[in-house]
Image (tube, rainbow, N blue to C red):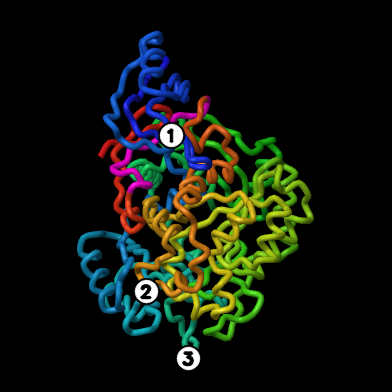
Amino acid sequence: MCLKRAFINGNVYVSFRPVRRVEAFLVVDGRVAMLGSTEEVLKAAEVLNAEIIDLDGGTVLPAFIDSHMHLDELGEYLNMLDLRGVRSIEELKEKLRKFAEKKDGWLRGHGWDQELFEERRWPTRHDLDEVVSDRPVMLSRVCLHAAVLNTRALEETGLIEWDSEDVLRDENGEPTGIVKEDAFSYAVRKFDEMVTEDEYGKYMLQAAEYALSKGVTTVGFVSVSERALKALSRLDAEGKLRLRVKVYLNPGENLGVLESLKRLGIRRGFGGGRLKIGGIKVLADGSLGARTAWLSSPYSDAETSGHPNVTKEWLELVARGTHEAGLQMAVHAIGDATMDMVLDVYESLGNVEGAGHRIEHASLMRPDQIERAKRLGVRLALQPHFVMTDWWVIERVGEKRAKWVYPFRSIAKAGMPFGLSTDSPVEPLDPWETVYAAVTRGKYEGVPLAELTSDEALSLEETLHAYTAGSAEVLMEDDLGSLEEGKLADFIIVSDDPFEVDEKELREIKILETYLGGERVFKA
């Protein structure tokens, strides 16, 4: 049966660049069929015998599109110990103690940041052992590039025997419990093996429903494993997936996943229902928080420049294979040395713009790199809330380089295509937290970077455009991002008009209802 609905008497934002508003719109078969005044839309609705929904002056916006997040990890995070904002190791231990009393089996938590701890040090396995020693515990840092494991977890994962710089050791050569990058990824895989297929599917659905409750109807799900793709395919086939998901797969061991996609002729956009394949995602370096992002000169607060996770030759092999297969490439690049490597690889491919190849994060991006990326036609997936979380960044990179950290306005002025996202669960999925961070850069919280780089704040129009049409462009989804006629009717009804509130109050805006293809999928 063809859905026909007329939404009237509203304050409806069709798009944000330019800002365009109407009173009413008509949805037919999941798409916007007409825009206009309430009177005009009512006339058309009468002819079509459409259902009438009176918005009663409510504000409607195109739904948010999160261009870079981790759906499975979000689902797991919603069932983990939440350690965001913890101010000391003692507080962390107390939270772990209470969590362990309620939950059986292997224990996971996420969100701590040693920069906030009054002890001014990283937690260790000995700290965790004091609380839980009889079963494995892993608590991931907020950046999801490092974690602390208790002794039992180090033993059961085998990491206690690893001879790697990613397993940190003390002056006696004993593991501290801190693991980074490859060792961290390995630990995550071992913990994930403890999750049953049914639990894993439930986590995925829980994350999807949570996204809808936050006004997000489409996500770019990155670093997707074969297990995650199978779970999503099953949920979509069963009609349970109510979120639009575009996946960017890990290339696989020995490039097995990429080779399978090439052999089967699966190109960007393949899929049906709510699920599509976008391309391949590569993690080329680490994070500023863990000092594993690769910089062109050493960190200002440590004798290291970080390091790449891959060689340039391997990255070019993957990128060329992805490019020739008609898939979209997405590369995590936080440090400027990594950015140089990725841009070199992209320049060797040709027609980057047409292929839609992306760079994720671009946390430290020099002016010459912005100019080069613009020339090549690279798309960016940015995370404004990093500005708030990385409040210590000036100490990490020094004042000169800090002026190149999260250069959102410079990117916008260059005319580069970019979308916004959260890297959730690294940052909160709530789009209004992201909007607030993009517009204010943490100036009301006293974030030092806000004062040093106040000229890099985005306007509200730029932010909302980037979080809707901009993210759709990054995902290469022409049917999404605005409420223009012919596009999919994905929209939200919100508590306040964002253009009528003080910028301090942006993060207080609530999602009242979320619609996907004109169908309500969430109501507060």
Q: Residue at x 70, y 65 (%)?
A: 341
Distance between mark 2 and mark 1 Cα atoms:
55 Å
Q: Residue at x 51, y 26 (%)?
A: 485
User: Few, some or many C-alpha atoms within 10 Å of disc 3 (few <14, some 14-19, many ≥20)?
Assistant: few
Residue 443 in sight from this viewpoint: yes
**Secondary structure beneath label 2:** loop
Image quadrant occupied by the N terminus: top left
Q: Is residue 347 above or below residue 390?
A: above
Query: Of the numbered discs in the image, which one, if any, rests on residue 21?
Result: 1
**What residue sits right under mark 2 in the picture?**
150
**What residue sits right under mark 3 in the picture?**
172
Rendering coords of residue 49 (x, y %)? 36, 10
Q: Is residue 72 above or below residue 27?
A: below
Distance between mark 1 and mark 3 Cα atoms:
66 Å
Q: Residue at x 47, y 36 (%)?
A: 20
Rendering coords of residue 509 (x, y %)? 31, 48
Image quadrant occupied by the C terminus: top left
- Which amino acid does the dot numbered 1 rest on? Arg
